[in-house]
Image (cartoon, coloured by chain):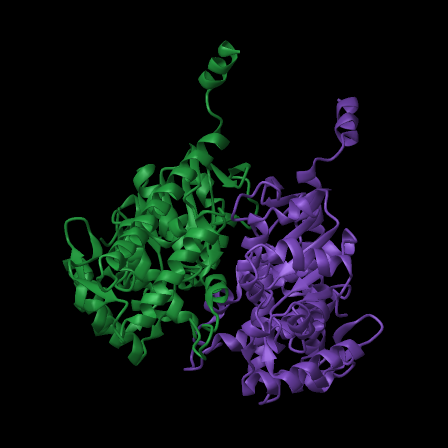
Chain colours: A purple, B green
């Protein structure tokens, strides 16, 4: 019997066991942070103090650009939220409602939920009053961000899902787990659809890889074009579409591909300020989610295109679109951002402001449908013609 | 040698061969329709006639509800578009530009493209004039629909892709093909993401199936909930999300699951006129795409929920939302549609108009997160509590 036990102990762990243990450790770590917060509040109450939570200040007045690590981060300003303070009490209560839901319903129950689920679960009329705990979802959403920064964690670790978006294909095998089922997914056999990138990717493990870089396109249409042209097989890369502004799951996955697998990541957007901004959010993070750049940013990402310079270089003048006032305004804004202050980006933005023309990536289809796969991309990658 | 040839002939065809042959036959059929159209025009020109194309009239004045087959269809009105007619000439030219692109670039090249690609490819200034062939994409989009109805075909057969949307999981193996690569995809091993439903599903083949019905949810969040709860495995079904209004690929796939596999299809949307409309579009088609109902409709689909009656039945009053004027207006509109004229739907819409309350599917999360998987869905399916 003793022998048998020993044998069992020495057996190598299965992927499922490893995956569940990793997730359990993460859950326990987050639960511990929630418990520490709770005990801190109880101590304050027992000590006769006004219960309060320290919450790093968010918003532009406490956002900085970390030029060394290339990411948008929160500065050092911290605010205290007090229970006995007319201006704070409501949000204080909401923050604790969110904390209690994350602890009891999500982490202890080992379930995930959306921000909307949480809103519905915690919205109720406070007994004996006509006051609702939460009126609009944006209130509980803000309380979630408060809790994230107060605990120095992120919402996926609180088991909160965001809207998933994005598809992926290429020569890589991954493992993904749902409860006790571990799936081995070969991204080179996903047909014309691709694998749908989930909203939480913490449990995804990268297995066999035969790819040299990642190409991430803002548009579904580009993914479909590249997939139909067998671009990823012919050029040994992984392709992903974010289907617009990148969702959290897609951003986190790109970061992990960059950092864990050391793969270069090249971004493909339209040649307009909106496309440039989508790129900068994937690379540096955003001001609204500055506390998440560590986890969602991909500082090594490069901008492959489409650039305003490409319009001339590839003779696309006839298929450009006249910039609208809102595009001009947006370009002038992002020109002031610290993370667009490099010479090449300033030159690029000046060129846009001078020509007042933008171009969509599909403008390349005016040459021929496969121009992007056969000429534009190989050309840009060979000459390493990227913006930082 | 003769023997060997014979042997080769008798060898069973591989799935790849079969798939490619089927696609080739479809391409040839569509090409033939295009050729017939072209020859018809040449004959008219040679006969000294004013070249014209017969195009079934679209829009509400030629839309009917086929109560027997339960679909929204085009009526019998046909218009003629003439080349020598100041009001027709531009659209006539655009329709032929689209036809030429579909023939030469897409079908003969065996490539697919988006409506946007087509727009960029065919937009140019007519030599010797200052006139552009196409100004705005909506012009070429309308010309595509003209061509679809004139040829009695649909855009996927012209190799035009729409924006893909939707994810799927369940106990079914499918085959999907991209050029010479045929992928066998096990939808029961797609992890937490699921398989991304492509924009064209004509080439998808259903293989092993171990499911008894299809559950299609309007919302990603519901898909994630059901997937995490292993709902599809425990209840032997396939789950799909359309992520909002259903895209063409998702609609066609639902139709094929219903008609080819004889699977019941149950729809899950929010309890509001917008949700009801999403359902009716999947089931009956829409007025704007009445010519496509044959191909995109799913007349056997049933509405599982969430209904206005569910609000009372499941005691959800506290988590309802007050209907806005626009919701009331929409409910009054759809109440007049022939395809909402059944008694149960009229009663449902009257209940909505009387209570002026709507509810989201996530309102069920106010009970507990798994209420939808453990109680609501099994309950509704067991009692077959559906709307037609």
Whether residue B168 sits left or right of residue A268 in the image: it is left
Q: Is residue B306 visible?
A: no
Whether residue A346 sits left or right of residue A157 in the image: it is right
Could you say which quadrant of the image residue B208 lies in? top left
- Residue B371 sits above or below residue A120 on the image: above
Q: How many labels sit on residues?
A: 0
Furthest-bottom residue in this view: A86
Could you say which quadrant of the image residue A124 lies in? bottom left
Whether residue A44 sits left or right of residue B134 in the image: it is right
Q: Residue at x 73, y 53 (%)?
A: A213
Q: Position of residue A176 (x, y in %)?
A: 62, 45
Q: Residue at x 41, y 57 (%)?
A: B100
Q: Residue at x 29, y 68 (%)?
A: B273
Q: Position of residue B297 (x, y in %)?
A: 29, 52
- Residue A246 sits above or below residue B227 on the image: below
- Residue A75 sits above or below residue B34 on the image: below
Whether residue B20 sits left or right of residue B26 in the image: it is right
Q: Residue at x 64, y 74 (%)?
A: A277
């Amino acid at each position: 019997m003793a022998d048998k036990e020993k044998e069992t102990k020495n057996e190598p762990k299965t992927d499922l066991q490893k995956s569940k243990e990793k997730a359990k450790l993460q859950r326990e770590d987050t639960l511990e942070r929630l418990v520490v917060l709770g005990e801190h509040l109880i101590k304050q109450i027992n000590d006769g103090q006004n219960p309060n939570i320290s919450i790093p200040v968010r918003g532009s007045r406490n956002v900085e650009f970390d030029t060394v690590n290339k990411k948008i981060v929160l500065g050092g300003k911290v605010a205290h939220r007090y229970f006995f303070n007319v201006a704070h009490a409501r949000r204080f209560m909401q923050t604790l409602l969110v904390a209690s839901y994350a602890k009891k319903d999500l982490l202890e129950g080992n379930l995930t939920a959306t921000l909307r689920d949480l809103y519905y679960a915690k919205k109720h009329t406070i007994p004996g009053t006509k006051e609702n705990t939460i009126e609009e979802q944006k209130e509980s959403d803000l309380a979630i961000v408060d809790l994230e920064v107060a605990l120095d964690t992120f919402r996926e670790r609180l088991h909160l899902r965001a809207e998933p978006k994005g598809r992926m294909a290429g020569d890589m095998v991954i493992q993904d787990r749902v409860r006790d089922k571990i799936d081995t997914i070969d991204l080179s056999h996903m047909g014309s659809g691709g694998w749908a990138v989930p909203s939480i990717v913490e449990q995804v493990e990268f297995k066999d890889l035969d790819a040299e870089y990642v190409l991430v396109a803002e548009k579904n249409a580009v993914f479909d074009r590249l997939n139909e042209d067998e671009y990823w097989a012919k050029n040994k890369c992984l392709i992903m579409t974010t289907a617009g502004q990148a969702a959290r799951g897609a951003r986190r996955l790109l970061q992990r591909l960059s950092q864990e697998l050391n793969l270069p990541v090249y971004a493909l957007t339209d040649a307009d300020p909106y496309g440039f901004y989508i790129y900068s959010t994937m690379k540096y993070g955003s001001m609204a989610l500055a506390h998440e750049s560590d986890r969602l940013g991909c500082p090594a990402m490069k901008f492959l295109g489409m650039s305003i310079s490409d319009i001339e270089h590839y003779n696309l003048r006839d298929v450009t679109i006249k910039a609208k006032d809102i595009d001009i305004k947006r370009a002038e804004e992002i020109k002031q951002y610290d993370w667009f202050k490099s010479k090449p980006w300033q030159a690029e933005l000046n060129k846009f402001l001078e020509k007042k023309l933008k171009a969509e990536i599909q403008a390349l289809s005016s040459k021929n449908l496969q121009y992007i796969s056969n000429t534009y991309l190989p050309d840009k990658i060979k000459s390493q013609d990227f913006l930082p």
